[in-house]
């Protein structure tokens, strides 16, 4: 083979190798570009996801904060309503207490009321012998109705007339000074307290105790009316 032919073949081989290398380099460049674009897209999506998550987290925080604030405002409003209710209920009870203090002013009516209270207490206790305690100022009035009360109880309960011992050593508290129901000192508006001889059974039948019972029973109804 001539030198010219050899040289021509060599040149062809060089061109082939060069072309193959360029194609390979181009393939690598394209693959690198695609890989770069994929990685860039993945990073972009990851950042978008982070931003969405952060937004959702902050949105939830705002929502929770709003719910807490609303709940606090609602509780504060309810508390104000309850406080207003309590004030009105206490005011009503104070008015009732003041009215009770005037009950004993009508001697005739109070005498009958005390007698009825004693009979009621005897019926509830069903004891053959009881100790009766009253205010010191009511002592004479109580003594004047004891026999009538015993007789009435005996007839209603169809039992023998009970023995009633009036406690002359310990009395119920007196009415408050200046008729002030806000007094910190204990006071009694009237009525009696009955006890069995052994002291195991005690029946609070004072006007104040009866008022407390009535208020406890009627409190749900009173609150309902205040809300309506």
Image: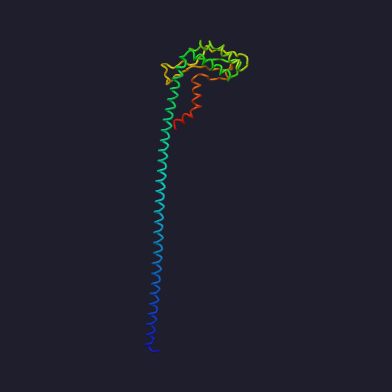
Q: Quadrant of residue 152?
A: top right
Q: Residue furthest right?
A: 159
Q: Quadrant of residue 1?
A: bottom left
**For residue 166, above or below residue 9:** above
Which of 41 and 96 lies nearest the eye of the viewer? 96
From this viewpoint, is residue 88 visible? Answer: yes
Q: Pinpoint residue 222: horizontal percent, then vertical percent.
A: 47, 29
Q: Pinpoint residue 196: horizontal percent, then vertical percent.
A: 58, 17
**For residue 39, above or below residue 56:** below
Q: Pinpoint residue 180: horizontal percent, then vertical percent.
A: 42, 19
Which of 217 and 209 lies nearest the eye of the viewer? 217
Number of marks:
0
From this viewpoint, is residue 135 visible? Answer: no
Q: Residue furthest bottom?
A: 2
Q: Pinpoint residue 78: horizontal percent, then vertical percent.
A: 43, 35
Q: Residue at x 58, y 19 (%)?
A: 123
Tell me which colouring the rendered structure shows: rainbow
Which of 182 and 97 lies nearest the eye of the viewer? 97
* In the displayed structure image, the side of residue 5 where residue 106 appears, left or right: right
Q: Residue at x 41, y 35 (%)?
A: 77
Quadrant of the image for the C terminus?
top left
């Amino acid at each position: 083979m001539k030198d010219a032919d050899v040289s021509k073949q060599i040149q062809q081989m060089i061109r082939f190798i060069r072309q193959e290398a360029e194609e390979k380099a181009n393939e690598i460049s394209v693959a690198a570009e695609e890989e770069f674009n994929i990685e860039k897209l993945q990073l972009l999506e990851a950042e978008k996801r982070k931003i969405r998550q952060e937004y959702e987290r902050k949105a939830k925080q705002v929502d929770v904060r709003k719910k807490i604030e609303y709940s606090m405002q609602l509780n504060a409003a309810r508390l104000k309503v309850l406080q207003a209710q309590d004030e009105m209920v206490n005011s009503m009870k104070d008015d009732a207490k003041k009215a009770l203090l005037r009950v004993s002013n009508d001697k005739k009516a109070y005498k009958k009321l005390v007698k009825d209270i004693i009979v009621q207490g005897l019926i509830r206790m069903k004891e053959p012998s009881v100790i009766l305690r009253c205010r010191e100022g009511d002592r004479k009035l109580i003594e004047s109705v004891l026999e009538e009360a015993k007789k009435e109880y005996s007839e209603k309960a169809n039992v023998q007339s009970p023995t009633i011992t009036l406690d002359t050593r310990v009395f119920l508290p007196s009415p408050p000074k200046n008729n002030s129901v806000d007094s910190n000192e204990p006071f009694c508006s009237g009525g009696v307290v009955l006890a069995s001889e052994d002291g195991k059974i005690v029946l609070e039948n004072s006007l104040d105790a009866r008022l407390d019972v009535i208020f406890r029973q009627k409190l749900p109804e009173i609150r309902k009316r205040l809300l309506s």
